[in-house]
Amino acid sequence: VQLQASGGGLVQAGGSLRLSCAASGRTLNNYNVAWFRQAPGEEREFVAFIAWRRGVTYYGDSVEGRFTISRGNANRAVYLQMNNLRPEDTAVYYCAADSTRFIEPVLAKDYDAYDHWGQGTLVTVSS
């Protein structure tokens, strides 16, 4: 499956953005999908995960309660709704997918567990 991330941009602190991870080649219904982010000079950080199994989601501690991950109705996209954005949320956001159907949180938060990656979309939050 090929992934394309979009929806990034410049927003003021407290604002909202919705990122999209669109799939081509096949649907995402049998894939776990996650969002990671990487700020300049920092390591890639886990943001959110949605499992192939309905209802299983995980979030990074820094975004819990502010971000929501969800699937599109046709399972051709996964979305990341980001509310109450902060300057420290500034980063390139990447979506990733894997078909091995793990649901353990330790794997969900490990970027090495994913085989497919989108190209990244830049989110900049001004103070």
Image (cartoon, grey):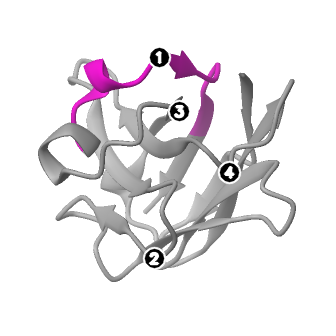
Q: Identity of the amino acid at label 1?
A: Asp
Q: Residue at x 78, y 55 (%)?
A: 75
Secondary structure at badge 1 equals loop
Q: Which residue is mark 4?
A: 29
CB-based contact (under 8 Å), mark 1 and mark 2: no
Q: Position of residue 65 (x, y in %)?
A: 33, 83
User: Which segment is the magenta one?
Assistant: 109-122
In the image, which disc is placed on residue 55? 2
Q: Residue at x 70, y 47 (%)?
A: 9
In the image, which disc is placed on residue 100? none
Q: Which residue is mark 1?
A: 115
Q: Is residue 34 above or below residue 84?
A: above
Q: Residue at x 48, y 70 (%)?
A: 13
Q: CA distance from mark 2 to mark 4?
A: 13 Å
In the image, which disc is placed on residue 97? 3
Q: CA distance from mark 1 to mark 4?
A: 16 Å
